[in-house]
Structures are given as structure tokens and as C-alpha cells.
Image: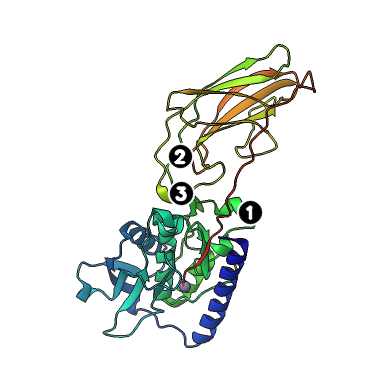
Amino acid sequence: MSRVRVLLALLVAVVLTAGLASAAEAAPRKWPKGRITYVDKSKDPDAVKLAVQVWNSSGLRIKFVKVRNVRKARLVIQNTRRVPSGCGSGFGTLGYPGPGRKAYVSILHGGDADGQGCAWPGQTLVVAHELGHVLGLNHNMSGCSLMNTSHTNGVAPTLCLGDDVDASKPGRWYCRVLEKVDLRKVKRMYGGKPRLREPEWCDAIERIPASGPVTVAQDPDTGWFTTTVTRAAEPAVPGWIGTWGYGEPGYEIHATPAACTAVPGDDSTQVGIGLWGDVPVGGTLTEDLQPVPAGPVCLSVWQFDRGYNFALAPSTVMVTGTGARDASLRAPDLPPRARPAVAVVTPFD
Ligand SMILES: [Zn+2]
């Protein structure tokens, strides 16, 4: 999505909030005893299960109770094509609908091409948001809140992300789900002792456990290094992760003086990159590095998957750098990192 479209989406989200705020002058009603029986007719059972779990374990005096029979359910969670903003958005009844009436949460199930916002981590946020409406919560744009009007990439509610575009990178998500302000507002209606969950961020994909081993050779004339890295096995990456960074799996090599303190993705310490191409797991790739500083230097190899998610651990090797002896020799270039603009802002509704 282009920057202009992102801005437009934000604008629409802001206008939607304004509209909802004025329409919701009459306070939403609370559910008797905070008990809501529901039936799950959606195509996102994992997301529904997790969203319900988050609310039910919040310490608030509310409970979503799953039932098999639609007739016994006061809340129907269903798949729908009629969502205003495509998949990643939905709608939910605001508050208790009254005796004999049902409440509804409607979401649109997405495919792999639709991104994280329509897969389980993102849909969990959407369902949890709609359940917030069902409990009686209105939108809240005062800061990071599950009840923000929109989410970004299904990673987090939009105001929970800073300006850093890497923060909205698919592959992780805001697994705390309920913010302090959300808990406070529901407590005011239903009571209880709300608990703020930790940690805030979770991996939405399985990470490469460890980077492959590395061996190093040094050119006696130039003092420059050549590294040979063995490709370690990588867990399968789900289709909805899309591409980020180089769009192809590989590894980065970083050089830090004296100690192995490199942080993957840090352009200031990067001295080499390899993209696997046809190299199979267990195969090797040899790359020339850019000159490293003189003296003891740690080379850290961080393998990454095609979504530019780094291995949990690097491989490291200590070398003695000489700096560039002959400045007229051309150092190998680092390819620029292609970072697609993927900050897709979708209204929750
Ligand atoms: Zn909403």
C-alpha cells in the first residue's frame, strides 16, 4: 500500500472514530453476570480460541462460555463477506443486546495472499477487538489500546506501534492484546481484578533455532576475509509472512571489535551478506567480506528466513583484522535491502 493510501486509511479510521463516538452517547448495556455464551461459526477457530482465552484470563468478572448449539448461544461468531474493509476487519454488536436477542461478531477469513492481518495472529486481534465491543467498549484513540480504530499489518493496534517501520514487520505480533486502559474500562462495568499480561510481543512464526557454522579465510595481500557459511535447517515459513528485507533467505555477517555484540539488521556493523539461492540445507556459500577494523574482531553470522526473521542465535568466530592495506582495491558491495512498504493499516470496525 502506498504512503498516500496508508494516510487515507488513517484518515478514514479517524473519521470512523469520530462518527462512532457521537453515535454512542447512550452507554452500552452490560451483560447480566458478565456471562456470554457463544458459538464459533467462523473459519478462524484458532484466533477465536485465543481471543476468548485472553479475555477469560484477564481477571475481569466476565466469561465467554463456548456452546455447541446456536440456539443456546447469546453470541454468534461467524465468517462474513460483508465486512466494510475486507479481511482483517469485522464488526461486533456493541454491548448486551437485551433479553432474547443475539449479539454477533462477524469477521472475514483470509488466504495466504492477504497477509498476517488475515491469518491467526492478526485475526486474534480482530476477534479480541470485536469481543471488546460485545462487552460494551467503544473505540479509544487516546493511545495504545485494543480498541484503537485500526491495526497495522495485523501486528498490533496502530497506536501500539511507533514510527519505526520495522515495528510493523510481519512475523511478530502484539500478544499482550489487552492494554491497561482496556482492562480499566471493562473493570468499571463488570468489576474484577484485571491482570496485565507479559510479554508484550510474540513471534508469530517459528524461528531458525541457530545459524549455520562459519569458517574464515584471510587474503595475505589485502588482509580481507572470505567466509564460508553452512546453511542450517529452517522451519517452514507460512505464506502470509510475505517478503521483507531481501525477500529471499540468507545470512548477514557483522563485525564488532573485541566482543560479539552485533545486533542483526544493524547496517553500521554489517560487512557481508549471502543469499542462499540454490544452496540446499547443509550446503555452503562463500562470500568476500568488506574490510573489518584492525585488531581483534568478532564476526557474527545471523541466518534469516525469507521474511527477514533472524535465527535465535548467531554463529561467531574471532579474527584479527588488519583494516584495508590497499585502499585502491575495491571492497565487495553490500546489496541494498529492499524494504517493501508494507505498513497496511486496516480498520478493525
Ligand atoms: Zn471497532
Q: Residues within 10 Å of mark 1 (few under 14, many from 20)?
A: few
**Three-letter code for the amino acid on which mark 3 is drawn:** Ile
245 to the left or right of 110: right
Reading the chain from its start, which is encountered first: label 2 or label 3?
Answer: 2
Q: Residue 12, percent across and down?
A: 56, 74
Q: Secondary structure at mark 2?
A: loop
Q: Secondary structure at mark 3?
A: helix
Dot 2 alpha-carbon crowd within 10 angstroms: few under 14, some 14 to 19, many 20 or more: some
- Residue drawn at (39%, 40%), measured in percent from left and top? 236
Q: Are marks 1 and 2 in contact (CB under 8 Å)?
A: no
From the viewer's side, name the closer residue of 56 and 249. 249
- Applied colour scheme: rainbow
Q: Nearer the viewer, mark 3 or mark 1?
A: 3
The quarter holding residue 324 reads top right
Instruction: In the rendered view, tell whether residue 199 sits above or below residue 260.
Output: below
Disc 1: which residue: 164
Is 248 drawn above or below residue 123 in the view shown? above
Going by the numbered disc 1, the residue's amino acid type is Asp
Residue at the spot x=73%, y=12% of the render? Answer: 221
Q: Amino acid at mark 2?
A: Arg
- Left or right relative to 261: residue 153: left
The disc at residue 207 is 2
Question: Which residue: 28% across, 66% down?
Answer: 40
Q: Whole-percent x and y of residue 172? A: 49, 50
Q: Which residue is mark 3?
A: 241
The earlier-in-sequence mark between 3 and 1 is 1
